[in-house]
Image: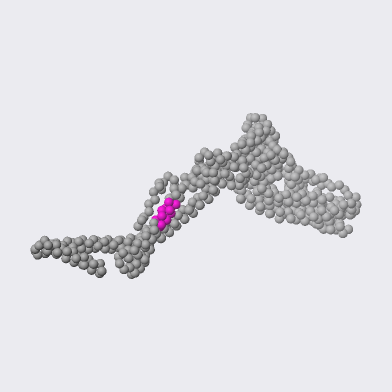
Amino acid sequence: MDQISQMETACGSLLYELKIIWDEIGESDTERDKVLLELEQECLNIYRRKVDQVNQYRAQLQKEVADAEAEIVAICSVIGEPPVLVQKSNQSAGSLKEELGLISPFLEEMQRKKENRRNQFIDIMQQIQIILHEFRPTDDFSKVDIDESDLSTRKLEDLYGKLQLLEREKADRLKQVTSHLSSLNSLCSVLGIDFENLAQEGSLGQYEDEGYKNVSDAAIQKLASEIQRLREVKIKRIEKLQDLVTSMLELWNLMDTPLEEQQIFQNITCNIAASEHEIVDPNALSVDFIKNIESEVMRLEKLKASKMKDLVLKKKNELDEILMRAHIFVDADDENESRFEAVEGTTEPSLILEQLEYQISASKEEEFSRKEILEKMEKWIAACEEEFWLEEYNRDENRYSAVKGAHLTLKRAEKARAIVSKIPAMVDTLAAKTTMWEKERGTDFAYDGVRLLSILEEYTSVRKEKELERKRLREQKRLQGQLVPEQETPFGSKPGPLKNVKKVTRTFSGSHRRKPSLGARIDSLHSIISPRLARKVDEEPTISIVSDEQQDINAVED
């Protein structure tokens, strides 16, 4: 107000001075009114321009305030925060300048927040692109595109979660690469391959001083492919080594190689049945190592060729021994001829050895399948021998003489009768086992060329004939009135020699060629079961109603 009053005083003083001047000039009232009107109009124009200028400034301030508020709202929307500070500023602000002064710090703070948030997005996106580029170097990840419309914390957390997943995947890939490199190094060691040279060939990807850092799909695939390739090489070499070791063991066995020579390769033979992952020793499958084994096998092959005759004879004897143990009859005339022709060079010796090996293997299987029956057969033959001895013993008229060792003979006779009493059960069991074997195998069970069931049937028939003959003689003696036993030699008199018994061997139906090494045992068996045994003695034994067991008891009591 003071300033306006001063202005009015100044204007009045100027108007008074103008009046004095006009009075001196003699200006008319019309001119004076006209000038005053012009002055008033000019003052109004000046005020109007000033008002308009101030009004524009006010609008500018209002726009700045509105723009600031809008920008704050937009930034809050972008970063996902509510515009709480703007509401508080609207409630506490007075003039436009004060309001703008209050909003500007908030705006600057929100702008800093947005810029920081944007930088966080850029940093995370760059890290993601770096990892993705490590996974797939051929893809273009040079440009970082950020959606400026959404810089919210939720989206930032999503990107951070994606980054963590990629970092875990990278860590897994590093572990996978490390595992692949370890496997590759182990394979190279076993195969005798220089790992460093393999790496320098470029087939393994990026190699740095601190190790392999390439975790791309292509690098991992190359490592896996290289491991698979070396593993296939390892498997082939294992198969080759096992074949060589098998051949070497067979040659050792064929030629009875001394243990001193075998000890040199003892560490190799243990790998003959090893699986692929069990062979881990350095250079265990190197080219030089396998060539060394090949050289040894070739040396043994040459040595084998020089000893072929001895090897054929050795295998022939082994086969004959198995056939003898299993009581398998083979017409071997033509076979022996071919074997010796092989040795002389008319036939390939290796083929004959293979044939002998096959026959030995088949004969061992056959021997195993016949084991139980042969064991029972041995027990039955032993019982038959006891039966044969008992029959000879019963024909001896001086068997009760009181001589040294007579009591031992009586005890053996008692034991022999106990064994002979079990023969029918033995025959039945043996026949049942044999029948079952023939059904399972679909072929006859032959014992030295003769069907065992035929032998058992003939033995049973002979035993029945002998029993009937004994009953017939007893009945004949009884009808002749010889019911009282003949007077026997008093116990203790001078013993007489056993009567000679002719052992007649019966020829069974069908052609049968018996092995010489079995002759004595089988001749005894055939003599036991021969139907003519009781009739082919120099003198028939005296048949008494009193049993042999009772006679022995009476002799002991006397």
Quarter of the rendering occupied by the C terminus: bottom right
Name the quadrant containing residue 187.
top right
Quarter of the rendering occupied by the N terminus: bottom left
Left or right position of 336 against 389: left
Q: Tally the numbered discs.
A: 0
Residue 127 is inside the magenta segment: yes
Asked whether 397 or 299 is in front, the reply is 299
Name the quadrant containing residue 481.
bottom right
Left or right position of 163 against 32: right
Left or right position of 88 against 194: left
Question: Measuring 59% from the left and 40% from the top, which residue is drawn there?
Answer: 192
Asked whether 298 or 427 is in front, the reply is 298
From the image, give the main secondary structure of the stretch colored magenta. helix
Q: Which residues are magenta?
A: 116-128
Give the farthest residue toward the front. Answer: 24
Q: Position of residue 175 (x, y in %)?
A: 53, 50
Residue 311 is inside the magenta segment: no
Asked whether 357 or 536 is in front, the reply is 357
Question: Measuring 72% from the left and 39% from the top, which residue is drawn there?
Answer: 260
Question: Measuring 52% from the left and 45% from the top, which residue is drawn there?
Answer: 212
Question: Measuring 50% from the left and 40% from the top, which residue is drawn there?
Answer: 202
Q: Position of residue 329 (x, y in %)?
A: 67, 42
Residue 52 seen in this snapshot: no
